[in-house]
């Protein structure tokens, strides 16, 4: 089986042969797995782009390469906060891809007029009539100002609203928002190394028709330190897994509550590898337990 480094080498060779980045995925002739946003007919591909450093650092040339590759290979969801919202928007407009991309934006709770003005400015910057998703990391402020967020939806400035957090200490508050019907989306951390969201939060989201996006699939890179130098189990081929990155992502995606996993990378070849997790089979529950055991033994 290939490891992440080998996969990167093969992807680079394919790029040289075809002149098009990402041809390894193209060779599969498969579409990325997509899942419907609960309560709608709209679907999102299961692999997304997190708020990459090149978006924040104003590296528009690199951002253009990454986003073009991501969209060309079937991706759609891009997470963007702060100045990244406008940098991503500029690239999407230059690529004439504003309508095809789904951008997760961050909008903190202030007064209604200021939130409305910011939503309009960001939408204009992204070439959209309405922002796809706005969420905030401030869970308590979101609850307090829920009427402002709902008003943005009612006025057609925003399509979906929600919260984005990482850390198990926030899970009870996020779960209560789900139970109270206050969110369309939540974004939380979940992986083999951080599995606690599966105890209550994910089942609650599934039962209440709330979409879940996952952050920290590689624990900010710590995961790769754990698996470094380890041989990918041969049985990973049974669910079309070609790298340690895909090992983590496929584990996450096999949970039925998950809509999309956000992979934060500025490296196009790593993005290709990540996108590969959205192709082919996913592990069943018995296999997921086996995967969990592998990682626990390495931790």
Image (cartoon, rainbow, N blue to C red):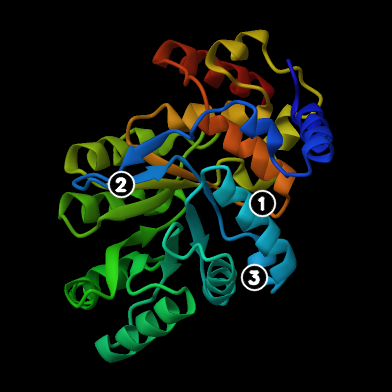
| The N terminus lies in quadrant | top right
Q: Does 87 appear above or below 205?
A: below
- Whichever of labels 3 and 2 marks the residue nearer the N terminus, that label is 3
Q: Is residue 53 left or right of residue 114?
A: right
Regarding residue 218, the answer to whether it shows in the image is yes
Q: Is residue 44 left or right of residue 270?
A: left
Mark 3 or mark 1: which comes first in sequence?
A: 3
| Local crowd size for mark 1, using a 10 Å CA cut-off: few (<14), some (14–19), many (≥20) | some
**Residue carrying label 1:** 265
| Residue 257 picture quarter | top left
Query: Picture coordinates of residue 289 (x, y %)?
Result: 47, 16
- Residue linked to disc 3: 56
Q: Residue at x 77, y 38 (%)?
A: 18
Q: Kindly report the distance in space between the C-alpha atoms of the residues bearing marks 3 and 2.
A: 26 Å
Q: Which residue is mark 2?
A: 211
- Position of residue 242 relative to residue 66, above or below, is above
Does dot 3 land on a helix, a strand or a loop?
helix
Vertical side of 182 occupied by 36: above or below: above
């Amino acid at each position: 089986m290939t490891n992440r480094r080998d996969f990167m080498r093969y992807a680079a060779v394919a790029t040289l042969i075809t002149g098009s980045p990402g041809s390894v995925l193209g060779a599969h002739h498969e579409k990325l797995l997509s899942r419907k946003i609960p309560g709608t007919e709209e679907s999102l591909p299961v692999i997304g782009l997190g708020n990459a450093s090149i978006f924040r650092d104003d590296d528009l040339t690199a951002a253009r390469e990454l986003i073009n590759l991501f969209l060309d290979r079937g991706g759609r969801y891009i997470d963007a906060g702060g100045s990244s919202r406008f940098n991503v928007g500029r690239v999407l407009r230059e690529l004439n891809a504003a309508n095809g991309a789904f951008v997760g934006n961050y909008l903190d709770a202030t007064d209604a007029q200021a939130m409305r003005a910011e939503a309009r400015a960001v939408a204009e910057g992204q070439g959209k009539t309405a922002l796809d998703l706005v969420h905030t990391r401030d869970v308590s402020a979101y609850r307090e100002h829920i009427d402002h967020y709902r008003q943005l939806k009612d006025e057609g400035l925003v399509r979906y609203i929600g919260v984005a957090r990482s850390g198990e200490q926030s899970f009870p508050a996020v779960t209560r928002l789900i139970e109270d019907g206050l969110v369309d989306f939540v974004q939380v951390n979940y992986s083999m190394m951080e599995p606690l969201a599966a105890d209550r939060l994910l089942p609650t989201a599934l039962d209440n028709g709330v979409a879940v996006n996952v952050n920290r699939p590689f624990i900010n890179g710590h995961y790769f330190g754990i698996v470094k130098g380890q041989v990918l189990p041969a049985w990973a081929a049974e669910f079309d897994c070609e790298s340690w990155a895909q090992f983590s992502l496929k584990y996450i995606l096999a949970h039925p509550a998950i809509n999309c996993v956000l992979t934060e990378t500025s490296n196009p070849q790593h993005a290709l590898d990540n996108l590969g997790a959205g192709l082919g089979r996913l592990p069943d529950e018995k296999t997921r337990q086996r995967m969990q055991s592998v990682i626990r033994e390495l931790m």
